[in-house]
Image (cartoon, helix red, strand yellow):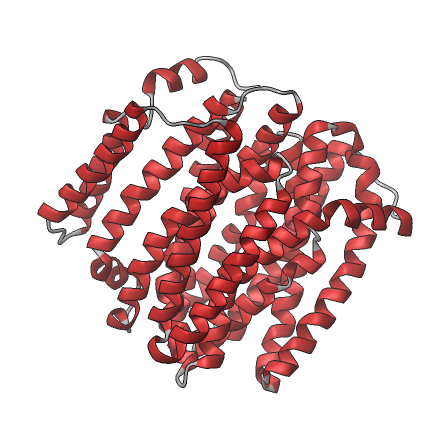
Amino acid sequence: MQRKFLSGLVLMLVLNLLIKPLAIFGIDAEIQNRVGAESYGIYFSLLSFSFLFNILMDFGINNFTTKRVAQQPEVATSYLGRMLVFRFILFIFYAIVSYTIALILGWDSYELYLLSFLVFNQFLVTLIAYARSHFSGLLLFKTEAFISILDRFLLILICGALIYMPITGHTFQIEWFIWIQTLCYGITVIVAAILLLKKIGKPKLAFRPTFSYAVIRKSVPYALLILLMMIYTRVDSVMIERLHWDGKAQAGYYAQGFRLFDALFMFAMIFSGLLYPLFSKMLAANESIKILLGSATKLLIGGTIALTIIACFNSELILGWIYDNNIYESEKAFRMLMVGFVGMSVNLIFGTLLTADGSLKFLNILSAIGILVNIAMNAYLIPKYGANGAAFATLITQCSVSLTQVVYCVYRYSLIPSLIQIVQFVGYTVSVFLLCYFIEVETVWMFLAICASAFFGLIIFRLIDMKQLKLIFSKVPE
């Protein structure tokens, strides 16, 4: 399992490092530069809103599928046909709920027009995620890695042609970006379906109310958890646009600070996606998860600490490389979001372990408390401080939730860290802090040198154990 995790992790990281940064910073950020903070702020707020109720199309089915297929691979074909029909019904329900709440919030006809495409895009994304849940459950990490970057690869090709080789002769519009996303998601759904059917066989489409009810009943705890987590991670941008007097612009400023946070979150999610089926299989077999958990924690949290410190010390420089405008307005929010990202990373590891172990009642209660804290802080801070207030609310929520999860896991699994492990993390954190404090970064090469030094620090402090990696990769991956 350790070998599968690390070999899958390397492949996923390599592919995502090649594609997603280019899509996020070369395409998405450049589109914001072209269309402006206010126009992009409308899109960002509507996009976050479309995420809020995405779970109504899933009800935790993806997590449930990954766990069930990992433990019982033979059920994949029988589930697929019945589940696809059920998903179309859930999409209709999701669309009705989304439009009803959008009308209550008072969005105008243009914003509802954009939302209609974003709602459909969420349906396509859900289908892609469902296919990936099968690949993950079957431990087909190479196939999952390919599907995970395909839509972004297509986005780079099409948007890149329109932005950097303007073949239309018109100024880029935010509507184009949304339409292109729809096309790229659609192609990815088709490719994922072909690969999945080739692996598990052709299913028989059928709607079985009894089956659907049984799946919902088993998936509701997963669905509730995802819904609660989605609310306290995505509701902030919607609240900014609705509560602040200059909400559209403030949402655009927040998007500039949030973009790198979101990009790093995508990479951190790779750990979660790989760990979930492995934890599920190991827990079902009563195997110890301590070694795998320790390796994942050292890699992700160690790297996250380094990136956070480097980003906070060089926030103006980093934002200046990405954006043309509103650097000062986004800088404070960016720094606070990056500190909150440490909590988010801890959440991904320990939350994944608890989800795989079925501790959903605890996670749901904790997430509900997180929502109350987050919404209350946003309601108080956003009218006064705009994007900065929302970023501070995110920081407090993420760190509080993750700390509670760690304490619970230490108690539940007897995960008492050794003195050496504590010294490793503290020593590494202090060394990266001092490195950034005494060295002023002025060029890209100096920034890359700082990042490289932080990476070698992971090896020096044995947060990356080279002997262990050599032992694992000396064997041919299954």
- Left or right of 347 in this view: 278: right
Q: Can residue 20 be seen in this view?
A: no
Quadrant of the snapshot with the C terminus: top right
Q: Residue furthest front?
A: 411
Residue 154 in the image, given as x and y percentages of width and height? 53, 54
Nearest the eye: 446 or 163: 446
Q: Give the residue drawn at x 62%, y 29%.
A: 139
Q: Which of 464 and 352 is in front in this view?
A: 352
- The residue positioned 37% from the left and 38% from the top of the image is 301
Q: Which residue lies furthest to the left in this view?
A: 438
Say whether residue 23 is left or right of residue 312.
right
Q: In this view, does 433 lie above or below 324?
A: above
Q: x, y percentage for residue 350?
A: 49, 38
Q: Is residue 27 left or right of residue 460?
A: right
Quadrant of residue 329 within the rendered picture? bottom left
On screen, 171 above or below 17? below
Answer left or right for 430 relative to 152.
left
Residue at point 70% right, 41% down? 64
The mark total stands at 0
Q: Which of 436 and 374 is in front in this view?
A: 374
| In the rendered image, the vertical position of residue 450 relative to residue 261, given as above or below | above
| Image quarter of the N terminus | top right
Q: Does residue 176 show up?
A: yes
x 27%, y 42%: residue: 306
Image location (x, y in percent) of residue 107: 58, 83
Check the image and report above or below for 235 versus 240: above
On the image, which quarter does residue 77 sit in? top right
Q: From the top left corner, tell me how far across and down residue 330 is, in percent.
A: 30, 68
